[in-house]
Image: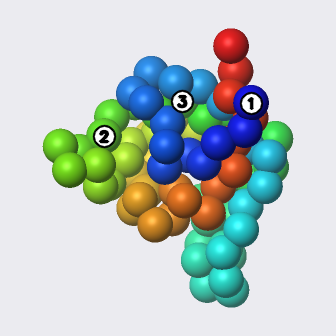
Amino acid sequence: MEKLLSEFSVGEKGVIKTVAGEGKIRRRLFDMGVTPGAEVLLRKKAPLGDPLEVNIRGYELTLRKTEAACVTMEVKA
C-alpha cells in the first residue's frame, strides 16, 4: 500500500518509492538522504503534526509536513 510520509502514524515503517517536489525542495531532500529505496520509521510527530521526526539511514531527521508530503512511501507490514 502506498501513502505519503506526511500521512504516516507514529511507529509506522516504510520504504521510499518516489520523491516529488520542485527544484530546491527535492534537491534538499536528496541531500539529506531521502532517496528511493531508503527505509524510514516515523518516530515522533509534533502536537499539531508539524514537524515530523523520522529515522532514516541510521540517523534522526526532522522534516516539515510540506516536505514529507513530497515523499511517496510503500508501507511495510
Name the quadrant of the C terminus: top right
Q: Horizontal and vertical percent for residue 54?
A: 47, 39
Question: Amino acid under label 3?
Answer: Leu
Look at mark 3 in the image and give the residue it sits on: 41
Residue 56 seen: yes
Label 3 CA crowd tier, 10 Å (few <14, some 14–19, many 20+): many
Inspect the image, locate mark 2, and give the three-letter code of the amino acid beneath it.
Lys
- Earlier in the chain: of badge 3 and badge 1, it is 1
Q: Specify the quadrant that holds the N terminus.
A: top right
Left or right of residue 58, residue 45 in this image: left
Residue denoted by label 2? 45
- The residue closer to the viewer here, 42 or 77, is 77
Residue at numbered disc 1? 1
- Looking at the image, residue 62 sits to the left or right of residue 6; the answer is left
What secondary structure is marked by label 2?
strand
Secondary-structure class at tag 3: strand
